Image (cartoon, rainbow, N blue to C red):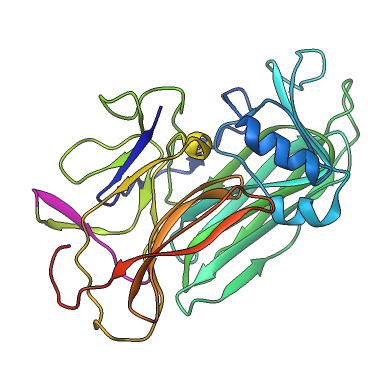
Amino acid sequence: MRHRTCLVLLLATAALGAHLDVNGSFERTAAVAPRFIAEAEKAKVAVSPRLPQLWQINYGMLSGRGGSSIQLVDDPARARTGRCALELKPAEVFLPGLPVKPGSQVRIHFFATGPAAVMLGAWLSSGKAQNLYPPPVAAGKADEKGYVEYTETALVPDDALVLSFSLGADGLVDDLSIDVDGLAIVAPDLAEPVADAADTLALATGDAPLVAGSACTAKLIDGLFGKAWQVGPEELLQVPGRYRELLGGGTLELWLRPHWEGADEQNHPLIDLSSDGFGLGLMRDQYNHVSFYGSDGWTNGTGIVLSQHWMFGNRWG
């Protein structure tokens, strides 16, 4: 089946509150594309047939190291609570970027059976990245299942736009929670359809309710067809979807009106749809071409495929 990804830009899901549902219990899972597993084996990385929804594999780090394993454990006897835990031996996973209020406080809490570390960072309005400290600290002794509690608290810089979160471990991890002042996001169940069409993997439009878990700081304005999202260079656009099915191929569809000079000799990403490092994307490059690119997340990429010349002018196209 050929899948369709319709994108007309996205949703802001920020509200007063603190708790972010990031599927930290790892109970909601999704199948991993067989092609991705096969490419992982070539890089000497073991990946289970199912992985937790929302969490992404740091394939760049793993492909260079080799000998790592990422496994979804579905066993109440090994999970700290519930049925599932995530086993990293040793490996790293990360979350999509989260919009944050400048100066807010971030609190992280999780349990692990072996050495574990969190890399918490922020993308700043200057375009630079900054790591946030201190690192998580183990608290107390291991419980009856061998889990040790880890906690971390950090302050977001005053010029921060997006929060980044990576988790590395050599053992089981379970019951992870993130609390950010002034932000409440609920991760959706990606097994649910995102639109009436069963083959639509992701959908974002200003004229229909968007799926829970979308995150954006854009402004809703009048568009070519109804409403559209106006996105500036310092704004986050993100919508969840069944991106692990992207390796099956499909269609990217959107309308865009640029707000930059037509011949500015800069690269402008238009769409980036990815999961675990593989995915598809469109960009307008510095040579004034609209280009398509893709990757299976390990060693095989399409490179840059020329689509057509960019048309100058502040208009929809």
Q: Which residue lies at the image location 81% right of the left edge and 13% below the top edge?
A: 77
In the rendered view, does 136 fall on the left or right side of 156?
A: right
Q: Is residue 282 magenta?
A: no
Name the quadrant containing residue 302: bottom right
- Name the residue at the top extreme: 76
Q: Which residue lies at the image location 34% right of the left edge and 73% below the top edge?
A: 289
In this view, the residue in front, 190 or 11, is 190
Q: Is residue 228 magenta?
A: yes
Where is residue 224 shown, x and y percent of the image?
9, 55
- Which image quadrant: the C terminus? bottom left
Vertical arrangement, residue 292 with respect to residue 3, above or below: below
Where is residue 23 shown, x and y percent of the image?
57, 32
Q: Is residue 136 visible?
A: no
Where is residue 68 shown, x and y percent of the image?
84, 43
Q: Main secondary structure of the magenta part?
A: loop
In the rendered view, does 183 fall on the left or right side of 164?
A: left
- Name the residue at the bottom extreme: 264
Vertical arrangement, residue 9 with respect to residue 145, above or below: below
Q: How many marks?
A: 0
Where is residue 121 shown, x and y percent of the image?
62, 63
Name the quadrant containing residue 202: top left
In this view, the residue in front, 35 or 169, is 35
Vertical arrangement, residue 51 with respect to residue 247, above or below: above
- Which image quadrant: the N terminus? top left
In the rendered view, does 69 fall on the left or right side of 181?
A: right
Q: Which residue lies at the image location 53% right of the left edge and 68% below the top edge?
A: 123
In the rendered view, does 131 fall on the left or right side of 180?
A: right
Q: Is residue 219 visible?
A: yes
In this view, the residue in front, 255 or 72, is 255
Q: Which residues are magenta?
A: 225-234
